[in-house]
Image (tube, rainbow, N blue to C red):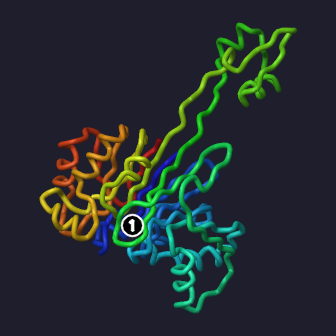
Amino acid sequence: MKITFLGTSCAKPTKERNHSSFFLSYGSEGILFDCGEGTQRQLTIAGIKPSKISKILISHWHGDHVLGLPGLIQTLGMSEYDKTLKIYGPKNTKKYFEHMIKSTVFEERTKVEYHEVKGIFYSNERYLLQAEKISHAIPTNGYRFVEKDKRKIDLKAVKKLGISEGPILGKLQDGKTVTHQGKKIFPKDATYLVKGKIICYLADSVPSKNSLKLAQDADILICESTYSSKLEDKAEEYRHMTSKHAGMIANQANAKKLVLTHFSTRYKDTHELEEDARNVFDDVIAAKDFMRIKI
C-alpha cells in the first residue's frame, strides 16, 4: 500500500505545489482522492499510469478539487481504458459532473459511473470505503479507507500440527475449521490475525463529530490545514481548519500519524504549520507534491 501526493496547495497552485489530489495504490487497484487542475500531468511526472485508476473519490465540488476531471477522463479514453471509471462524491455530484462534461466538446470514450455516497459505500474481501458529511461551505465528504484484517499462517504451529502445504492451509487462512488426521483444527490453532490499515482523508472543513468518527484509530490521517492557529478567525470565516485543529483531531481520534496538506500560498515553507500541529500531536509531517508514504 502506497500513497503518492500529487497536489498539496489550496485554492491557488504555486511553482512547487499543485491543486489537491493524492493517489492510493493498493495491490492492483488505484484510488484517486480529489482531482484538481493539472492532476493528470502530476500523475505523469510521478510515473503513475492514469489507467491504474479504478475509483475517484471527490471530497467536494470547489474547482481546486475537481477541475482536473475532464482532461483526465479524456486521457483515459485515448489510452484505451477498458474499465468502468467509478466516481464517488457528496450531494449534487451527479448535477455538477454532468454540467462539467457539458461545458466542453466531450468525446465519451470512457464509461463513467458516478455516485453520491454516505456511510459504507463499497466493500470487498480486502477493504471497505466509508464517506461521511463534514462541515464546509458546500456539501463535502470526508473518507475512510479500511483494510480488512488478514489471517496469516503460523508456521511453527502448522509444523507442530504436521500440516504440509496444500488446500488445508488455504481453508485455515480463510477462517475455516478443518479436519486433519482425524482431529479438528480451528483457525486460531494455526493462524494469527494481522490488523488492517486505516487511512482517513479530511478535506476542506471545520472540526466536527464526523471528522473524529472518520479519523478514529487511523494509521494515516491526511488532513487539510490551510492556516496556522494565528489565523483561526480567517479559518473560521472560510470554513477551513488550522494545523492546530488537525493536530487536535489526530490526538482525540487516536491516530498514529498526521499528514498535513492543502496549504495557503502565504506559507513559503510549512515549518510554522508543522510546529502548530505538534503542540497538540507528536507525529506530524507536512506533505509535499510527489511525496510518497509506504504503509
Residue drawn at x 64%, y 18% is: 154
* Residue 291 falls left or right of residue 242: right
Q: Where is residue 4 in the image (x, y as percent from the top left)?
A: 45, 55
Residue drawn at x 48%, y 43% is: 198
- What residue occupies the far front of the structure in this picture? 209
Q: Where is residue 295 in the image (x, y as percent from the top left)?
A: 47, 41
Residue 114 is drawn in which quadrant?
A: bottom right
Residue drawn at x 68%, y 14% is: 189
Residue drawn at x 54%, y 37% is: 196
- What residue occupies the far right of the structure in this picture? 182
Vertical relation: 216 (above or below) 155:
below
Q: How many labels does the image show?
A: 1
Name the foreground residue: 239 vs 281. 239
Q: Position of residue 23 (x, y in %)?
A: 49, 58
User: Where is mark 1, residue-wise?
Assistant: 20
Three-letter amino acid code at the position of disc 1: Ser
In the structure shown, which secondary structural element does the residue marked by tag 1 occupy?
A: loop
Vertical relation: 139 (above or below) 172:
below
